[in-house]
Amino acid sequence: MTIDLEALYIDLHQHPELSFQEHRTAAIAAGHLRDLGLEVEEGVGGTGVVALLSNPSTDSGTEGPVVWLRADMDGLPVEEATGLPYASTARGVDPAGHDVPVMHACGHDMHVTAMIGAVERLLATRDEWSGTVVVLIQPAEEFGAGARAMLDAGILDRYPRPDIVLGQHVTPFPAGIIGVRSGTQMSASDGLTVTMHGRGGHGSRPHTTIDPVVMAAATVMRLQTITSREIDPKDVAVVTVGSIHAGLKNNIIPTEATLELSLRYPTDTMRDKVLASVERIVKAEALASGAEREPDIETLHTLPATINDEEATTRVAAALRAKLGDEAVIDPGLFTGSEDVSWFARDAGAPLVFWFWGGFDPAVFAEAVAKGRVESDIPTNHSPYFAPEIHPTIEVGVTAMETAAREFLA
Amino acid sequence: MTIDLEALYIDLHQHPELSFQEHRTAAIAAGHLRDLGLEVEEGVGGTGVVALLSNPSTDSGTEGPVVWLRADMDGLPVEEATGLPYASTARGVDPAGHDVPVMHACGHDMHVTAMIGAVERLLATRDEWSGTVVVLIQPAEEFGAGARAMLDAGILDRYPRPDIVLGQHVTPFPAGIIGVRSGTQMSASDGLTVTMHGRGGHGSRPHTTIDPVVMAAATVMRLQTITSREIDPKDVAVVTVGSIHAGLKNNIIPTEATLELSLRYPTDTMRDKVLASVERIVKAEALASGAEREPDIETLHTLPATINDEEATTRVAAALRAKLGDEAVIDPGLFTGSEDVSWFARDAGAPLVFWFWGGFDPAVFAEAVAKGRVESDIPTNHSPYFAPEIHPTIEVGVTAMETAAREFLA
Amino acid sequence: MTIDLEALYIDLHQHPELSFQEHRTAAIAAGHLRDLGLEVEEGVGGTGVVALLSNPSTDSGTEGPVVWLRADMDGLPVEEATGLPYASTARGVDPAGHDVPVMHACGHDMHVTAMIGAVERLLATRDEWSGTVVVLIQPAEEFGAGARAMLDAGILDRYPRPDIVLGQHVTPFPAGIIGVRSGTQMSASDGLTVTMHGRGGHGSRPHTTIDPVVMAAATVMRLQTITSREIDPKDVAVVTVGSIHAGLKNNIIPTEATLELSLRYPTDTMRDKVLASVERIVKAEALASGAEREPDIETLHTLPATINDEEATTRVAAALRAKLGDEAVIDPGLFTGSEDVSWFARDAGAPLVFWFWGGFDPAVFAEAVAKGRVESDIPTNHSPYFAPEIHPTIEVGVTAMETAAREFLA
Amino acid sequence: MTIDLEALYIDLHQHPELSFQEHRTAAIAAGHLRDLGLEVEEGVGGTGVVALLSNPSTDSGTEGPVVWLRADMDGLPVEEATGLPYASTARGVDPAGHDVPVMHACGHDMHVTAMIGAVERLLATRDEWSGTVVVLIQPAEEFGAGARAMLDAGILDRYPRPDIVLGQHVTPFPAGIIGVRSGTQMSASDGLTVTMHGRGGHGSRPHTTIDPVVMAAATVMRLQTITSREIDPKDVAVVTVGSIHAGLKNNIIPTEATLELSLRYPTDTMRDKVLASVERIVKAEALASGAEREPDIETLHTLPATINDEEATTRVAAALRAKLGDEAVIDPGLFTGSEDVSWFARDAGAPLVFWFWGGFDPAVFAEAVAKGRVESDIPTNHSPYFAPEIHPTIEVGVTAMETAAREFLA
């Protein structure tokens, strides 16, 4: 009667869905949660799922503490290259209307699987604790938009407000390792779309045009200097141009070029500085090309820093150490990645604890460390080679989520 | 009973079709040619049309001279911005499967229209001449592939071989002006697709990746130095990166970037030099990025120089001067644009005459010249603003083609 | 009979000398040390000065602990722009034979002044302590070469070997503040000279040349990507091109270009990575230009990380707190700057403590902090505006050096 | 009693002098001209020499036609690498005060030698012609300033005004070949100095600076796009950055960078366009860096196009063909190099004929042509390998100048 978590994981992995299109994934998760006896709402903020597990204290008769557990479920437009027997061959249509490959390259399939497993365990031990668990299966984390959408759908009004928000992310640590720290755990981030305007024309007559390809290329090169020259080498900032698109044909000089930027920084001060530098460079490079129109800079998403509450994090870390052993819990340092999980805690005014759990073969990891090749040999999240080991990753994820939740349930 | 050429032009303009997809256009052209009484073959080399007008000498009983008249008919993936009442709103699917706007931004609609008009006139005057006219309505000039496809379909074996090949192109000259020169009229050209291989990963962790966006941007900047530093300033060469594409999302560093290049040069020596420089730079920039795999460089098309036969060109120019006035025929100099029309002449071993005819309001032109703003104010071929005046452009195109043909028909 | 330290400082400030040319400075320092009664050796490793202050314990009759105190004394090729009444107008001849301005833009004049003051104080209190003080006035810290030169001159054989090596550096902190930390205090550093070989020729005929100016410019742009793309954003590394030189005349394309690089990193692993990246990029950019000869990469200097001994640093920090107040001593974090002071400790196998002391008006500092303009408003070392406040900077420097030395003298 | 022209050439070649410093060269030339019996003035416009050879017609008693013959005499800051036994090892001090190597890398030593030889011949044949010859030995052609200086010294007022101005330049053609054309023979040119302002600081703290090295490098890369993208590929324009200088030391980020540009174009329209593009790019790149001050753009020199008078050129070409054979005189096309010789003709309102004569071994040349390696194997003017064959270059230069002069002398 137990859910086959391995089968669930493989199924989700083979059927990744792009952000806000997670219909199948949401239905499967909702189905399991409903089967487990939870009260389930679907279609929250698009494709989000909320499930309520109420376990009031028989002694006091009170509701007890309210714990929000969050998992995200969207895949990415990446073509899987892991060579696994259960590798994804899925396709999807991205917001620009392009047919693209889809892959669970960030491990959200593992997040959903571990959440289902953790809920099952909490149910199995429900007489050991009391309180209220709200399970959130969130869409579109990769757009930095899904948490916002669920909150905008009014969940704070319809569900018990949290005393604590908990979330976790699978990551390229050795399986068995949990990384968590107080304070800033993940960077703030902005996603920008920059459209640079040239003047199109025939590829053989560049002098009649303002070439947006050259304009964009010069801009990309110049944007590198923000981190190389403008940010204190001791500070952490990232300026990535994740996509560049211009032109449909080799012999037509197009009219515009589009860059998509991903920016990362741990503080608001640095955010202001980096955004100002990006704007300055983009505008100046358009001027250098003689552009007749200023570039457009549009914000795709703004993610706040993921800041773990000090007291709650100390409790979670201690509980995990007690469960998994002292060596199993490390301070992973600041991550340059970003998350939208903290919107739940921020909007609710509740503390947040968000941690990472390792999913990779410790032997492979040890070898990479020995060779000084961790960065090149261990596929990172979003890589087409990203592939957590199924076991014990599922089990550790289930245990971590259950243990952390229990820490706050009476 | 005369064909309404203005209506034909507007209809074609409103329904542009991408290369090798010119089904509607070909059917319309074939219909008119058949209605005029010619023997018509469709589907030649994809969507090409060949029509035969046999007008043997009643005196000698011989076939007489064979004249091949060629027009091309494909549109381009450009979004029309002319604001004309008959502007195109058409869409198409390009070879990469993208849904794209389509426009007759190179005036091939005018070429087909003028060809139909010229054939009608030749028929009307058929007792003034004798010989054989082979009309070629060619697909996919913009791919540099349509002429090749028609030849590979065996037309040299099935139709009388030409004594002369004639073609024309509408261009941003004042209406009424014909430009033609002996020798090299248009440049040779290669279209290349360059794929640069990086290593993908999360946008917040650039150090685990080899960023193909930066690799491609550096390559674009370096490619500029071929013409700025390596080619004799007195020579003519063009290195255009007409498209650049990498990445699907701001926070994923992609695995590869694709550049499409259009190269132009009047001679084989320079072709060798430019191709070698492109290859050297592309490979070196991949090395500079630490790429783990060499870039792929694929040739999309190779177009020879369009070289007008000296004697035949002298005859055509004289005939046009006699018809249109001395001032109407100019030497336009070498064009950096390229054409695949010369494959017909090269394969047949026949002389070629290919000329340009102006399609723009002489008053607007004169004003642009006076202001020294021809390059910026007069939209060039492939511009989203390219829009020949309907009249007298059609009439001059008809007259020019008829006159040139008659020069070689007994 | 006390030395006028303000006058000494102003005199040194007005007469800065370039590395290994500190004849006047060395003579003045040696004069004072000799006047104070120390045994002085000059010309050590070029222009270095060593002075011995022996104060054996009268009780035990032993030599007591041996403390090496080090100051550096060279100026920099910077044109002073402070506008101070005592600003330098000095000139010097650099190793390339160029006549250049010279300035104490790194505060070494303050180091020498504070050292003389500290020795004077140690003498005044000599019955309160016993032991041996070796004073090192070092040349050419800015070349990363002076410490090495003094060691190569055999001072470890001729002088009592140290139990501890102490040094200090004036820095843009508020006056009164001392910054010191255990472990890595300053980065390792390499100075490289890169010579890129082109082919010269006439400025109007670039195609007959291989332009080293373009080659060097492309290389500078590409070198930015080491820190922006290849180094973990959470790590600290700096790749600075401090000088670029090519060409003598606008209309001659030169045969070569020279770049001087300053590289910084806290660890050997990162050093290997950055050096490999620099070499890869420099070579690839030469290939991209079609260079006929590989670039030459020469190491100007290699500086190890400045690593403070944990136990000794704890003692120094405690002594300074006791003397100056708890708030006066901070952990300044890792500096990306580098020093050659650690060669003395490394060669001797002795612990090192090296600290920073502030020299800038606290009010100005507080205003800059309030405005978030510390980086732009407070001139950093090597800036033409670098100008420590004379008081209390001298006094704090004297006290800090005396206090730290006394901590180790019995 | 004949002058040993080979010895003269070798002597001049071994003692090149920088622009406006040609004291020895001028004295030698003046000495020979005086020995030949001409009336000589020295120190004209700095180091210029003017010599008058008056040979009035005995028949008519009139002065006869006035012919100005011009040669230039300055060397260049290039280190000779020819390996010739008479190679220069000279040094000089350039305007910036730098000690630099000096070489006759542009062949002006040959110009002076041929001029002395031609005057000697004209004297030897003085009863075959009548008229007035004014010999101009000009300084500082390489600064584009010597002709201007001589004119500003009033030579038009003190000497008979010319009916024709003649000049010649040795060039990498096969010896025996003369190249001359009517109309624009050499391009107009501007020399610019661009100073870009950053903010200096310590090499380890780039974020406190505005790095002018990166600013200048980005500018150099962007300047390439003027010719690659903004100028009609069929037009001739050159944008060369002949020198780049910034910084004195690897670990100091300097406050400014200096670029020296050489620009070439055949027409004023293109001059305006290129100058505007340079200014636009330089300013925009400063903005992209966040520079606090606009760059300074200073004009070093402005040279007009060298335009040969049509009628006079036809006469000279015919005379040279008659003397040297038809094949010896070619149309060399437009040169992208520039000259200040035309100031003499422009100020005097007289026609100009300026031609090139070859100085290189025809066999070597033929081999380079056969291998398609002329550009790389034949050293161009300003190359450190530039080395005309002594014979017959001197003889052809003498004959050409004498023949052209005689064409205009009665």
Image: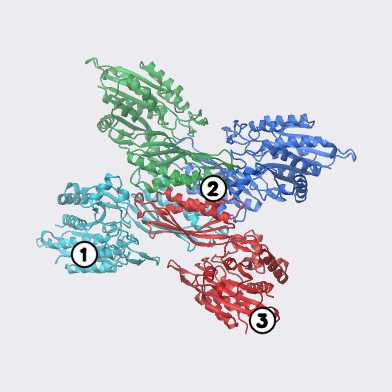
Chain colours: A green, B blue, C cyan, D red
Q: Quadrant of residue B124?
A: top right
Give the farthest residue toward the right: B59
Residue D161 seen anywhere in this rendered image of the structure? yes
- In terms of image quadrants, where is residue A47? top left
Q: Quadrant of the N terminus of chain A?
A: top left
Please tell me whether mark 3 sits on a helix, a strand or a loop. Answer: helix
| Classed neighbour count for the residue bearing mark 2: other residues with Cα under 10 Å, few (<14), some (14–19), many (≥20) | many
The reply to whether dot 1 and dot 3 touch (C-beta < 8 Å) is no
The picture places residue A166, in percent across and down from the top left corner, at 32, 27
Of all chains, the one bearing label 3 is D
Q: Are marks 2 and 3 on the same chain?
A: no
The chain under label 2 reads B
Question: Which three-letter amino acid code belongs to the residue tagged 3?
Answer: Ala
**Residue indicated by mark 1:** C7
* Residue on which the image places disc 3: D124
Dot 1: chain letter: C
The residue labelled by disc 2 is: B282
Q: Is residue D73 left or right of residue B183?
A: left
Callout 2 and callout 1 share a chain: no
Q: Quadrant of residue B359?
A: top right
